[in-house]
Every structure is written in structure tokens, then in C-alpha cells.
Image (tube, rainbow, N blue to C red):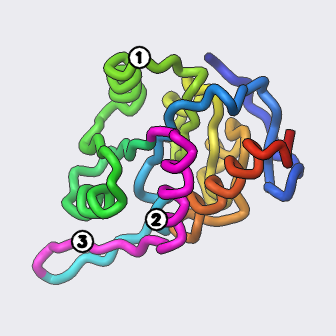
Amino acid sequence: MSRPEQSPSRESGHESQRSNGFIFDNLRLVVYDFDGVMTDNRVLVSQDGTESVFCHRGDGWGVGMIRRQGIEQVILSTETNPVVMARAKKLGLECVHGSGDKLASLKDLLDERGIAPENVLYVGNDMNDYDAMTFCGFAVAPADAHEGILRIADMVTKAEGGKGVVRELADFLKNRHAGLFA
């Protein structure tokens, strides 16, 4: 599925939300990039090389809200870092990390689950997410995502990465399911 590049517009309280015919009732999987989506894309490196990141507690609540809607969720990250796995474990999410090719990793994930790409929502923030985002049925970007990602996003959150993107998405999906944005 290829989507044309488009400039963001304002609709439904979100900085960008363009209709691409996505059927939210068929949503089966949400895929998150980690850095820049669940974090503010910064890293604190201690003198021994240990890395730390900041995450938003509300995103943990958002993961639970989406889970209660019966939608699967996965983190897909290029990073091979214990902090990614630790957060995924705490949230109860499967994590594919160390992916050098997110599109190939995503295709494998979908094949294993028998999920069609048009039933997938992908949240990403940088150009290494581009191919995977355009392959999926619905693409979401944080407000501070790379310009190239903002152009292809079906929805741009008000929240910046690491500042409640997942929680905002969870509210959007809940309201969408309730017909408030239909």
C-alpha cells in the first residue's frame, strides 16, 4: 500500500488526520517505534555506558486501554538496548529489537500472525519507519516527527514523542470506536 505524500491538515482536534479509507473496526495490530514515540528521543548515557530514557507514564495507561479493546500491540525498534526490552516487559508488550529493516521485520510479524497490512496501525517518528508506515493501513506520527514522516502520516498527534503519544492514540481509538470521530 503506497500513500502519496501530503501536507498535514487540522481535523478532529488532531494536528493531522487524513482519511485514507482505513476501517478502524478491522484494526488488529498497533506497532510502535520506541525512540521518539515512547521516548522523547533523547538518551542519558552514564560514564559506564549505561543508557537511560524518559517515558511517559500515561503511555503505559494507553497501552492498557488499547489492550482492553482487544487490539494486539508490538514494539519494533532498530535499537538493541536493554532499556527497550525493560520497558516492553513492564508494559507487557512483545518487542522486536535490533531490526535493521523494519519493513522486513514487520512483514515477518504479520505473516506469523496472519494479519493483513491494511489492518495495522503503525506509529513512527523518523525515516527508518517510512517504508513500514506506508505499508500499513494507517500511519500515526508524533508532533515532533521528521518532516518526511509528518507528510505521510494519516494522523499527527498533538503530543510530542515521549510525552503521551500512546495515551493520545488510545483516547482517539476509544472515541473512534464509540463513533465520536466517524
Residue 160 percent coordinates (x, y): 62, 65
Q: Tag 2 or tag 1, which sits nearer the N-term?
A: 2
Please say if the residues under marks 2 and 3 sit with CB atoms less than 8 Å apart. no
Residue 67 percent coordinates (x, y): 49, 48
Q: Please report the residue visible at 54 percent of the width from the left and 38 percent of the height from the top.
A: 122
The range drawn in magenta is: 48-72
From the image, tell me which residue sits under label 1: 114
User: Is residue 23 or residue 133 the one in the foreground?
Assistant: 23
From the image, tell me which residue sits under label 3: 51
Q: Secondary structure at mark 1?
A: loop
**Quadrant where the image shows the N terminus:** top right
Q: Please report the residue visible at 24 percent of the width from the left and 43 percent of the height from the top.
A: 98
Near mark 1 (Cα within 10 A), the count class, few <14, some 14-19 or many ≥20, is: few
- Residue 128 visible in this rendered orientation of the protein: no
Q: Amino acid at mark 2?
A: Gly
Q: Tag 3 or tag 1, which sits nearer the N-term?
A: 3
